[in-house]
Amino acid sequence: MGGNKKEQKSYGRLPGDLSPAETVERIIRVDQAGEFGAKRIYEGQLAILGETADGPTLREMAATEEKHLESFNDLMVERRVRPTLLTPLWHVAGFALGAGTALMGREAAMACTVAIEEVIEEHYEGQSAQLDENEAALKQTIDEFKRDEVEHRETALAEGAERAPGYPILSTAIKSGSRLAIWLSERI
């Protein structure tokens, strides 16, 4: 069946499918945006709860998110990936979500963490599955960060997240917002 190299390389892809390079760019862009948003959420929560008994737990989780953000910032520079144009929105929205849930009480702040980390675990799992052996280092980073996010979720559950007033509604709303933020940040 002959065909040139370009045709052979695109075999198995459908029109509109992202190339492997475009997929990696999208992964790095959205993950950097997500870690930036997480940092801002914890900053909002710490502004309200930082001087309470919850402060050390929140600071520990925030430090992990800062480490993740630094890694994705480095990858953006190394791979020449542009950031999402929505960064100013995530700057404000992340802090507002963190402060807002903290104002609702410690359990609501923990419920926020649980909801977001459940979405991120699923998100990172999907990304990891998309990456092949050519992107082993990125896949390893994503898998490591996913384990950190699962640990945050477990910590927040142990801290009483499910006792938050209106937990099912709060959780559903935060998950929906997180999924929308992911979709937008991948594309814009």
Image (spheres, rainbow, N blue to C red):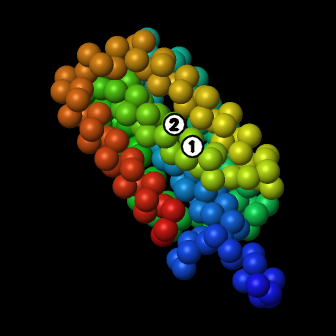
- Give x and y (percent) for residue 74: 74, 53
Query: CB under 8 Å between callouts 1 and 2?
Result: yes
Give the quadrant of the N terminus. bottom right
Q: Residue at x 47, y 25 (%)?
A: 153
In this picture, is 82 found above or below 167? Answer: below
Q: Residue at x 53, y 77 (%)?
A: 16
- Give x and y (percent) for residue 167: 24, 26
Q: Residue 78 or 21: which is nearer the viewer?
A: 21
Q: Residue at x 48, y 69 (%)?
A: 188
Residue type marked 1: Tyr
Please indicate whether residue 2 sits to the left or right of residue 157 in the image.
right
**Distance between the Cα atoms at labels 1 and 2?**
5 Å
- Give x and y (percent) for residue 67: 67, 37
Q: Which of the 4 image quadrants contains residue 145?
A: top right
The answer to whether residue 102 shows anywhere in this view is: no
The answer to whether residue 18 shows anywhere in this view is: yes
Label 2 crowd (10 A; few <14 / some 14-19 / many >=20): many
Q: Residue 151 or 38: which is nearer the viewer?
A: 151
- Give x and y (percent) for residue 103: 28, 29
The disc placed on residue 124 is 1
Q: Residue at x 75, y 78 (%)?
A: 8
Q: Residue 56 or 186: which is nearer the viewer?
A: 186
Please indicate whether residue 57 sits to the left or right of residue 112 in the image.
right
Residue type marked 2: Glu
The disc placed on residue 141 is none
Residue with the mark numbered 2: 121
